[in-house]
Image (cartoon, rainbow, N blue to C red):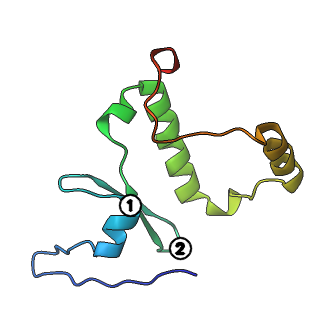
Amino acid sequence: MALEIESTLTDRYQTTVPDAVRRTLKLRKRDKIRYVVRPSGEVVLTRAAAAADESDPVVGKFLAFLTRDMAAHPERIRGIDPALLRRARSIVKGVKVDLDAPLQPEDE
């Protein structure tokens, strides 16, 4: 179920990001927010990538291309093929991953 939240623009076109949105996006003071405006007029708000994530110019340009392409052509976005999803799940079955664990030097 989608959560709908409103905020009000000030006379200077500023607003406060609602608490539920800040918590969902894990936003902190001084973080950047990215807006993707789709041709339909829908706007998607996400947390912008940190500067460290953009240090690889090739990855950064590829992600920028994907962002522009998805915004310009949302009709091209498709779900994952169920057979591929089943295969991927079978490959990683039983694998435990701690996303909060620090990377080992050989993993960086």
Residue 1 percent coordinates (x, y) = 58, 81
Is residue 82 positioned above or below 6 on the image?
above
Q: Quadrant of residue 53?
A: top left
Please indicate whether residue 107 sits to the left or right of residue 29 in the image. Answer: right
The residue that label 1 is drawn on is 25
Residue at image position (40%, 65%) is 24
Q: Quadrant of residue 17?
A: bottom left
Residue at image position (60%, 39%) is 97
* Label 2 element class: loop
Mark 1 or 2: in front is: 1
Amino acid type of disc 1? Leu
Please indicate whether residue 16 sits to the left or right of residue 64 in the image. Answer: left
The residue that label 2 is drawn on is 40
* Category of crowding for the residue at label 1, using alpha-carbon neighbours closer than 10 angstroms: few (below 14), some (14–19), many (at least 20): some
Q: CA distance from mark 1 to mark 2?
A: 23 Å
Amino acid type of disc 2? Ser
- Between residues 97 and 35, which one lies in front from this camera angle? 97
